[in-house]
Image (cartoon, rainbow, N blue to C red):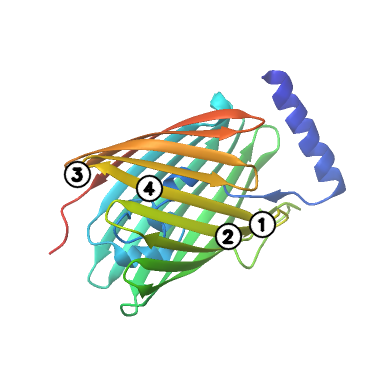
Amino acid sequence: MKKILKQLFLSFISLHGIGQIIHSPARAHYVLGATYSKTFADAFSFANNQAALASYNNAAVGVYGEQRFLLKETSFYSFAFALPTSSGSFGAVANYFGYSDYNESQIGIAYGKSLGKVIAIGAQFNYYHVQMAGYGNMGAINFEIAAMFHPAEKTHLGLHAYNPLGGKLGKNSEEKLASLYNIGMGYEASKQVFVSAEIVKEENKPVNVNAAMQYIFAEQFFARAGIQTLTSSPYAGIGLLWEHFRIDIAVGYHPQLGLTPGLLLQYAFEENK
């Protein structure tokens, strides 16, 4: 593992000498599978489109962790909290990726509001931070904007832009934070079945398609599965609902790097009257 990390750092140094490094925010696609839904929405739905906050009827909190490719040095953790109010819904989200010698983190405050039965809008302000042993720290403030459209009761469309204005990481750094755009759609085929797909364009990367499906096969049990076409990486998980609690056990697979196990815990508060 030490040899691998040394090679990564050497690659980083060589790249820095010939061009600009673009950092991409770490994401876990398993927890973003319910973005384009009202019925299947959960604590993490707004993390991929802040306008989804407008559909929340109750406060919710969730934590998720995964050990990417079974390496503790590439662990990812995420926290989300959503709070609906009479003047719109608020959310907070925090992500951490890496380990003590190299890590990336981001914290954000979000807001979403309905403009009627058909349209909702949302925005989020973030602070993104990178820490590298021996190279110092870098950080940048950025924002996200989003919209959701509900042309039919069971059909939901979304637009989202992350860091659309770009910008460098730190005043004296040649490194920058990537811009990311996505458009997606979800269809609630029934009270048990939900399918979605989104097209994602990230700066300096080819177009990626994320497709997902969720199926409630018993009153308290459900399954979720999906795939990222850019890396041909499928993922799946099973979940248990018990009163206001929810627990998911998930696993992802990368054709070259292997398995990524994950665990999701959520709690939904009493619905606002």
- Cα separation between marks 2 and 4: 18 Å
Kind of residue sitting beneath label 2: Ile
Q: Earlier in the sequence, mark 1 or mark 2?
A: 2
Q: Earlier in the sequence, mark 3 or mark 1?
A: 1
Disc 1 crowd rating (10 Å Cα; few below 14, some 14-19, many 20+) is some
Q: Can residue 26 be spotted in the picture?
A: no
Closer-to-camera residue (18/44): 44
Image coordinates for residue 50, horizontal then vertical, percent: 42, 63
Q: Which residue is mark 1?
A: 207
Q: Disc 3 and disc 1: Cα gap in Å?
A: 37 Å
Quickly name the residue at label 4: 214
Q: Mark 2 or mark 3: which comes first in sequence?
A: 2
Amino acid type indicated by mark 1: Val
Q: Nearer the viewer, mark 3 or mark 1?
A: 1
Which residue is more in the foreground, 157 or 103? 157
- Whichever of callouts 2 and 4 sits on the residue coming sooner in the sequence is 2
Instruction: Tell me which numbered mark, 4 or 3, is placed earlier along the sequence.
Output: 4
Q: Residue furthest bottom?
A: 116
Q: Amino acid at mark 3?
A: His
* Comes first in the chain, label 4 or label 1: 1
Disc 2 vs disc 4: which is toward the camera?
A: 4
Residue bearing the label numbered 2: 199
For the C terminus, the image quarter is bottom left
Q: Which residue, given by chain and number where applicable, does mark 3 sit on?
A: 244
